[in-house]
Image (cartoon, rainbow, N blue to C red):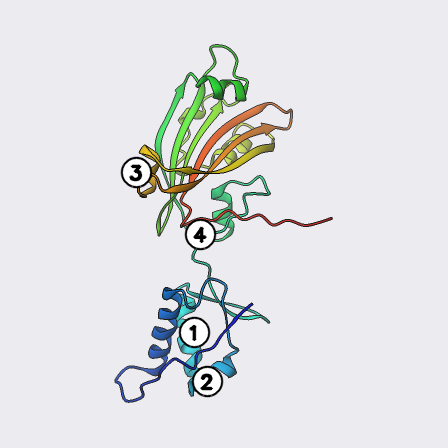
Amino acid sequence: MSTAHSSDTDIHRELPVAIHTQISDSFRTKIASGEWPAHYRLQSEPDLAADLGVSRGTLRRALTTLIEEGLLRQVRGRGTFVTSTTIEPAIAQKLSTLSEDFARQGIAMATRVIAQDLIAPPRPVAALLEVPAGGSVLRLVRLRSTGDGPVTLLYNYVRTDFAPGIEGVDFETQSLFGTLEGRYSLQISSARRTFSAEAAEGEVAELLGIPSGQPVQYLEQVTYLANNHPIEYSDVWIHSARLRVTSILSRR
């Protein structure tokens, strides 16, 4: 991993601006410009202070400012790094929801329910969920956002014969999987996920706040109970600039 060198950071001692502020401003510019990309490692504090010609206390004040702003993070025994500007939930290899991944990372997230009603499922959805003839499903449309704006648009279709009354749940405050497992004592066991790139059109582009035709990550999922019955089908569109799907793999 590369290490940042800061000898090109100019300190103007004659200016009525605190030196630690000048340093944090300079580092902030390097991060914003991409000169220091996500995961970039800075020099050690002693080396960095020596390069800049300042005390370690002054340097530490500058670093603390950027850490509090969320631009830098310190890892004990490894050093100081530029934080990633893209959320990276590892949803490619484990059966967790985006809301669960966000919560584990301490990321504040808001959910807006756009539609929540009982419908006769579209024929492809009925086939995937094995909905009995004449059966209905819950259609749940939600937009999840962080402080940076919309991140994901989710369309969920849920079998109501396994979860009667689910249409009355407040899904702006309750999670779907949490409701199925907690309120209905259903054991969610597995899912099949398919990832692809799609062009955002119509409602997808509008709700995610991106130009029509811009590529987004698209996730299609069928979720199964422990008895192998399908319980939920979902279409998920992901704002690629704000969320990146990662997969951690091991070779056995």
Answer whether residue 186 is visible to the viewer in this image.
no
Reading the image, the residue beneath label 1 is 63
Reading the image, the residue beneath label 3 is 206
Reading the image, the residue beneath label 2 is 51
Residue 191, compared with residue 23, is above or below; it is above
Identify the amino acid type marked 4: Ile
Mark closest to the chain's N terminus, 4 or 3: 4
**CA separation, marks 3 and 2?**
48 Å
Q: Circles 1 and 3: CB distance less than 8 Å?
A: no
SS for dot 1: helix
Q: Quadrant of the N terminus?
A: bottom right
How many other residues sit within 10 Å of disc 4, few (<14), some (14-19) or many (≥20)?
Answer: few
Residue at image point 40% right, 76% down? 62
Q: Which mark is residue 107?
A: 4
SS for dot 2: helix
The residue nearer to you, when weighing 206 against 104, is 206
Residue 245, compared with residue 123, is above or below; it is below
**CA separation, marks 2 and 1?**
15 Å
In the image, residue 42 lies at what x, y percent?
A: 49, 73
Residue at image point 42% right, 72% down? 64
Mark closest to the chain's N terminus, 2 or 1: 2
In the image, residue 143 lies at what x, y percent?
A: 37, 38
In the image, residue 125 lies at what x, y percent?
A: 48, 21
